[in-house]
Image (tube, rainbow, N blue to C red):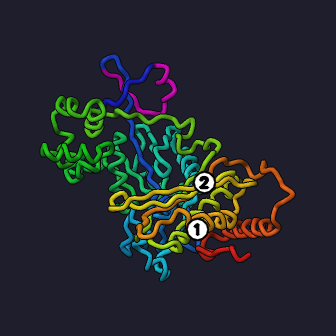
Amino acid sequence: MLKLFTVTPARLRRLKFFKTRHHANKWYIEAMIALIDCNSFFVSCEQVAHPELKNKPVVVFSNNNGCIISRSNEAKALGVKMGEAVFKYKHLFETGKVIGCSPSFSLYQKISKQVVQALRGFSPWVEPYSIDESFVRFGGTDQASVLGPGMRQAVLTQTGIPVSIGFGATKTLAKLASDKAKAMPGNIMDLGSYALSRVLNTIPVEEVWGIGYRTTRWLHRHGIETAGAFRDADPHWIRKKMGIGGGRIQRELNGQLCFPVGISVQMPSFYAQEAAQKSLLHSRSFPERITSIPGLQTALAENIKSACAKLRRANLCASEMGFFIKTSRFDSHYDSDAWTYRFPQATNNENEVLRVMKSKLPTLFKSGYRYAKSGVYFNGLIPDSAVQLSFFVNPREEKERALLGTLDHIRQRWGRQSIIRGSSLTSV
């Protein structure tokens, strides 16, 4: 019998559906933990929102479209790596072999909540661990062979998101099983149906939940290469060297539950509504050094368009803007300059910001310097409904705002690919 965690008589009355045992004047619960991990979650969400992307090589970019943070299986087959800079695969995007999507975190949070709601149909003990992972606890009498396919089908039917499911006696074991489930038939793995020692001896110690890079290096120096070797190490030595956390991880690998699954009465912090935003920054490093004003203008224009689009999506306007350019700190000639400007009337019109930037950039540029990064920031953000109107608004600006609103609506309705990226409205 696995001794998991002690419960009080009051709690026991609320846990009648769990299998319990009495030993040494204490009650123990025999539980089974499942970790549900959404496969390529951000890409899967985009494919749910845009069905035409299914079964195609698709990737999702980071906030500033600088890195790749999610890939479809088709993109993985083409050699696209996780976390790599977007410019390294520029030829794939330009030729249409891979489709790139800017992130839509509001969509991802919405679908994540739907996944959690689907899991609550199988157990009240659901604990979201991240935006694409959740722990679920079941009683000791429940069968993984029945629960696994049922949960996977329910989530797929209700949300359209494919998931991998790992079962284990503890959170740490369930996490390891979930990682291995991605390569298993049906994307389901139950560690309880395998010889645990044999499985753990095949898993590198760095793959154990809670063991980081520095700890891995230290363990390797002491000859601990696998999860099995870590589990079998002297507990007193592990506790002395790694503290309480290390001891708990080791006990979890031995089947003793140290991190119980709680009821998700409230969503964790990554679901929390953001506080009123007061400023916004958008910056990007260059794949190659820039030594000319036109090159810097192009780079800053990309920053400005992305930042202003974020302002419009949040229904905000900026009272003040600024931009900066800088060289690398490793260059022999380091330079970093910034300039700020306060608008006569708060705005989110990218063309107005572009005109200000183009008039002031030559005053910051220094010939002979190799610039490596640029960025734009907005301060004094207020709701667009609170912007004070003026009798002296340029009619040209009103037309630009109307056109930008129309383009934003098209992007929202038909996707970001419906508007040619990098198009300028300065000719309006």
Which amino acid, by three-letter code, is at mark 2? Thr
Kind of element beneath mark 1: helix
Name of the residue lying farthest toward the right: 391
Position above or below: 195 against 284: above
Instruction: Please name the residue that numbered disc 2 is placed on.
Output: 340
Look at discs 2 and 1 and give the one toward the viewer: 2
Q: Mark 1 points at which residue?
A: 301
Residue 287 falls inside the magenta stretch: no
The one of 230 and 361 positioned closer to us in this rendering: 361
Q: At 71% across and 55% down in the image, what residue appears? A: 343
Q: Residue at x 63, y 69 (%)?
A: 415
Image coordinates for residue 202, horizontal then vertical, percent: 21, 54
Point out the tag, 2 or 1, that comes first from the N-terminus.
Answer: 1
Tell me whether circle 2 and circle 1 mark residues in contact (CB < 8 Å).
no
Up/down of 269 relative to 320, above or below: above
Percent across and percent down for residue 306 are 59, 63
Q: Distance between the residues labelled 2 and 1?
A: 16 Å
> Which region is colored magenta?
9-23
What amino acid is at disc 1? Ala
Q: Residue placed at 52% from the left, 40% from the top?
A: 268
Residue 162 in view in this figure: no
Q: Which of 134 and 32 is in front in this view?
A: 134
Say if 214 sits above or below 256 in the image.
below
Residue displayed at 26% across by 49% down: 206
Q: Locate the C terminus and report the quarter of the image it occupies.
A: bottom right
